[in-house]
Amino acid sequence: MDKRNLAFGRMNFILLAAGMAIVIIGFILMSGGGSTEQAYDPEIFSARRIKVAPLVCLFGFVSIICAVAYKPADKHITHEAESQDTRLSSK
């Protein structure tokens, strides 16, 4: 398959993987033991689960959106434009 037919480039996939890893880390930070009917565990309301983990997940989702929107500069088109500019300026 030709690389020009792909919707995303290599950098997009790297950024997507990094964003997904950040989201997974956020969900891991949210996990832990819960309360049962016999015992109440106040740890379910810790700052790590209530504040830090959702912010980490939000940062991961924002980075995934940025990875999808990222469009690298096409070097081939830029090179052609530069060579065309030099031809025009030499006339």
Image: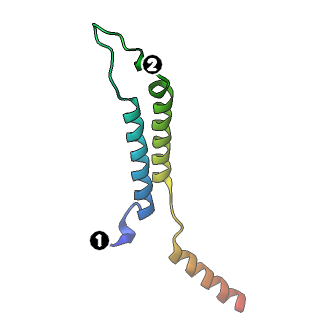
Q: Label 1, label 2: how many angstroms apart (C-alpha)?
A: 51 Å
Residue extending farthest bottom: 91
- Residue beneath label 2, please? 45
Residue 84 vs residue 19, the one in the foreground: 19
- Number of numbered markers: 2
Q: Residues within 10 Å of mark 2 (few under 14, many from 20)?
A: few
Q: Secondary structure at mark 2?
A: helix
User: Which coloring applies here?
Assistant: rainbow
Compared to 39, does 30 lie above or below? Answer: below
Residue extending farthest top: 38
Q: In the image, 83: left or right of 25?
A: right
Please identify the quadrant where the N terminus is shown.
bottom left
Q: Tell which circle, 1 or 2, labels the residue nearer the N-terminal end.
A: 1
Residue name at image x 44 percent, y 26 percent: 49
Residue 9 lies, in percent from the top left, at: 42, 63
Residue 17 lies, in percent from the top left, at: 39, 52
What's under tag 2, amino acid-wise?
A: Phe
- Residue beneath label 1, please? 1
Residue 57 vs residue 83, the one in the foreground: 57
What's under tag 1, amino acid-wise?
A: Met
Instruction: Determine whether label 1 and label 2 are within 8 Å by CB.
Output: no
Residue name at image x 60 percent, y 85 percent: 83
Compared to 14, does 89 lie above or below? Answer: below
Please identify the quadrant where the C terminus is shown.
bottom right
Q: In the image, 78: left or right of 32?
A: right
Residue name at image x 46 percent, y 41 percent: 61
Residue 66 lies, in percent from the top left, at: 50, 50
Q: In the image, 16: left or right of 80?
A: left
Residue 31 lies, in percent from the top left, at: 35, 29
Residue name at image x 47 percent, y 31 percent: 54
Compared to 19, does 76 lie above or below? Answer: below
